[in-house]
Amino acid sequence: MPKRFNWQLDREMDYPYAAPPPKRQVAYIFDTNKCIACQTCTVACKTAWTSGKGEETIFWNNVETKPYGGYPVGWDLNLLKQEQPARWNGQQLTSLTIFESDKPGQPPRGHRPLPEDYAHPNLGEDDITGLAELGAHFEGTHPMWMFYLARICNHCAHPACLAACPRKAVYKREQDGIVLVDQERCRGYQECIKACPYKKVFYNIISRASQKCIGCYPRVEEGNVAFCVESCIGKIRMHGFITPEGPPREDNPVDYIVRVKKLALPLYPQFGTSPNVYYVPPIHVPDPFLEQIFGPGVEASKNLYRNLAADQKLLGALLLFGASPRMLTRYEVKGDQAIGYDVDDKEAVRVPFTEPVYQRPHRDQRHEVYRHNTA
Ligand code: SF4
Ligand code: SF4
Ligand code: SF4
């Protein structure tokens, strides 16, 4: 059984598929504190990639409301019920991953959602954890809460979908770590759907093949961010490359936020697939719930986020979210500006820490008119 070091679990783990890691790895960071569930990302992806026949209930990008929402319905609850609860000793996982809890060398047993589980992509939207009683008021902690969780394929470092495919139709690209399904090789056995803990592979009933987020690879090849990232209204997303092994680069905004400062955390790291979408946890949500989803780094991450004003370098990296259609592979903070550089190391964007304010004079001398604040 090949062993792989999983830095998210701070230990080696079994992984039933021997393949060299990619030369570099795409990664995304989503700041859950800023998502407004407008679903622009969902629609951008849908219109770009999955508007064909058999794709009516396929959403490679979805945004669900936690704690009750989930697409497909119960995607995470069903797996949590099936597996042992995660146990951590500090940052190290002491319980078993999905690759270790069944027979050695076998792909994870997983579970396959029912067709009706895909029928209501936003079930539970905006549902909160309790009722707001008459006279309730804010006392420093939120007695009831919810938050929005945007989800795409994690282009995992140890993909369960790939490990499970009997046809070897799922593969991970060497140049960027994007995970794809070869539509010619796929015979629709759906083992990948069963194995993926995030349920981010979908079955097309017309083409009779499995389909999944393609990581917008034609855009990545040009150095541009994915459609779901560029279209994000709330500017909650960053799309770049992470250094998966060895020391992280302090001037790479993704490395800095994820690996150096550990502000953004992986989704259900205990499953062991090493997902590459990282989340800044919502600071208003109680820790026990968040620790189940994002692992043991939640409290430290929330403290960092609350004190961002004291950390110019980290704040500068966050200012680059949604600031450029280019993937940013390097950044620096100079004076009161965060500057992002693209894959060709050309300056792509400058963002000021404080938005400049321009005041126009009341009288426009050129046109000899007064300006009024009325339409
Ligand atoms: S576009 Fe951005 S803000 Fe809107 S739902 Fe998607 S991730 Fe959230
Ligand atoms: S999220 Fe699922 S579909 Fe995507 S790479 Fe990981 S295991 Fe595969
Ligand atoms: S990366 Fe591209 S294909 Fe994947 S969810 Fe986003 S828009 Fe869709």
Image: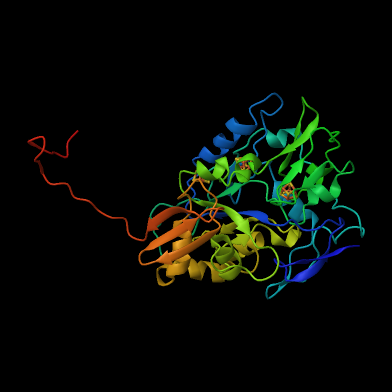
Residue 109 screen position, x and y as percent: 85, 50
Q: Nearer the viewer, residue 71 or 175?
A: 175
Q: Which quadrant of the structure image shows residue 21?
A: bottom right
Q: On the rendered structure, is 314 left or right of 73?
A: left
Q: Is residue 46 above or below residue 284?
A: above
Location of the C terminus (image quadrant) = top left
Residue 255 screen position, x and y as percent: 59, 64
Colour scheme shown: rainbow
Query: Is residue 311 among what the camera can see?
Result: yes
| Residue depicted at x 55% and y 36% | 44
Q: Is residue 250 above or below residue 214?
A: below
Query: Is residue 129 among what the camera can see?
Result: no
Q: On the rendered structure, is 163 left or right of 308?
A: right
Q: Which of 328 and 70 is in front in this view?
A: 328
| Residue depicted at x 70% and y 48% | 178
Q: On the rendered structure, is 135 left or right of 342?
A: left
Which residue ends up furthest to the bottom in the rendered image? Answer: 90
Q: In this view, does 192 lie above or below 13?
A: above
| Picture mark count | 0
Q: Nearer the viewer, residue 189 or 83?
A: 189
